[in-house]
Amino acid sequence: MTNAKLTSLMSRGTDFLGCETAILCGAMSWVSECNLVAAISNAGGFGVIACGAMTPDLLDAEIAATKALTDRPFGVNLITMHPQLFDLIDVCARHAVGHVVLAGGLPPKGSIEAIKQKGARLICFAPALSLAKKLVRSGVDALVVEGMEAGGHIGPVSTSVLAQEILPDMAGQVPVFVAGGIGRGEAIAAYLEMGAAGVQLGTRFACATESIAHPNFKKAFFRASARDAVASVQIDARLPVIPVRALKNAGTESFTAKQREVANLLDSGAIEMMEAQLQIEHYWAGALRRAVIDGDVEGGSLMAGQSVGMVTREEPVAAIIAQLMDEAAQALERRTA
């Protein structure tokens, strides 16, 4: 079920992305690979490859594999602190990737220009209105407003507050996509009416039929409730660690020990701050792989947003998107009845 109002409200997002439905899939390391990305794009949404810690060669192969599965638009998410960021940008350009998403902090000098000069549209995360304005002045083409309800790396402010803060000022300037804690179409309709061009969901797609995540990983999601998805704790103010939201398990405690280890190396002068942050990133990449690929749901990282309680069974991507759009359309119809 769709209606003219829903199509109209999403038109800015669909025009920008080049797809039928302005629903992006959040980039989830090890999960947002060619199979899930292609399935989302084929279903009318917008898939995004999670580059994470991939080397340029690995990203090259992943993009090629995705293009073999879909002829529809998709994007690539790059981490700003990746030591080979500019090489990864070149890989995206060689494949004529139309949209690049930069995550993990402010874009480093020259990265915005490098992406746009090669013809891609650039999407960045805006955790505050001041940063949203700065990013747009710098040439960013679209923004993602992601609240702390999301899975993976999170900020300190809720989605609803960020949307109220940023949409009135920025939605008229660039397309703004809202993310974090979205699991049903009624919420999508509400954010569209507030001025969003579309939305981004990750957790809702993590257990799709097309997701390569291990059955144990998916079962952990099906059993979980919203309160099980907790944010990691920073133990040392000298080591700025972006909190990560995941289902609580033994791996959560292991991260505390890892922070102590890295903080001690930093204090001793054995490593610099950039290396310390990279070690933390590599820890998460490894812990997430153990859960997603190997099925170690106790020692691995079960990154999930608070919408995890709405993930109750394995479903095809097309069915998930159809349900979300149906719920959104019905919510809009109820409001105009």
Image (cartoon, rainbow, N blue to C red):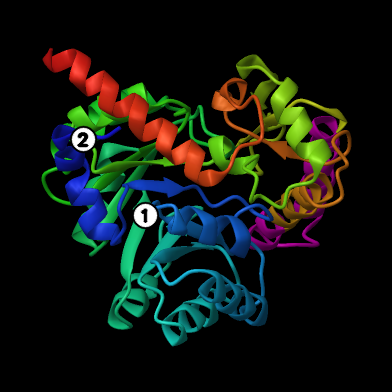
Q: Which residues are magenta?
A: 251-278
Which quadrant does the N terminus fall into?
Answer: top left
SS under mark 1: strand
Which quadrant does the C terminus fall into?
Answer: top left
Instruction: Give the residue at mark 1.
Output: 124
Give, as a three-letter code, the residue at label 2.
Leu
Report the residue at 49% width, 35% height from top.
155
Kindly indicate the quadrant of the structure image that contains residue 23.
top left
From the image, give the main secondary structure of the stretch colored magenta.
helix
Q: How many marks?
A: 2
Q: Is residue 276 magenta?
A: yes
Residue 126: in sight, yes or no?
no
Instruction: Give the residue at mark 2.
Output: 6
Q: Is residue 107 depicted above or below 117 in this figure?
A: above
Q: Residue reaching furthest bottom?
A: 94
Kindly indicate the quadrant of the structure image that contains residue 335.
top left
Q: Position of residue 94 (x, y in %)?
A: 45, 87
Q: Is residue 225 depicted above or below 3 in this figure?
A: above
Report the residue at 75% width, 53% height from top.
266
Q: Is residue 108 depicted above or below 28 in this figure?
A: below
In whole angstroms, how far apart are the C-alphas of marks 2 and 1? 25 Å
Report the residue at 49% width, 37% height from top.
320
| 60 horizontally vs 251: left or right | left
Q: Is residue 46 magenta?
A: no
Q: Position of residue 200 (x, y in %)?
A: 41, 42
Give, as a three-letter code, the residue at label 1.
Cys
Q: Position of residue 293 (x, y in %)?
A: 80, 52
SS under mark 2: helix
Judging depth in this view, the residue of 185 and 337 nearest the camera is 337
Judging depth in this view, the residue of 278 and 291 nearest the camera is 291
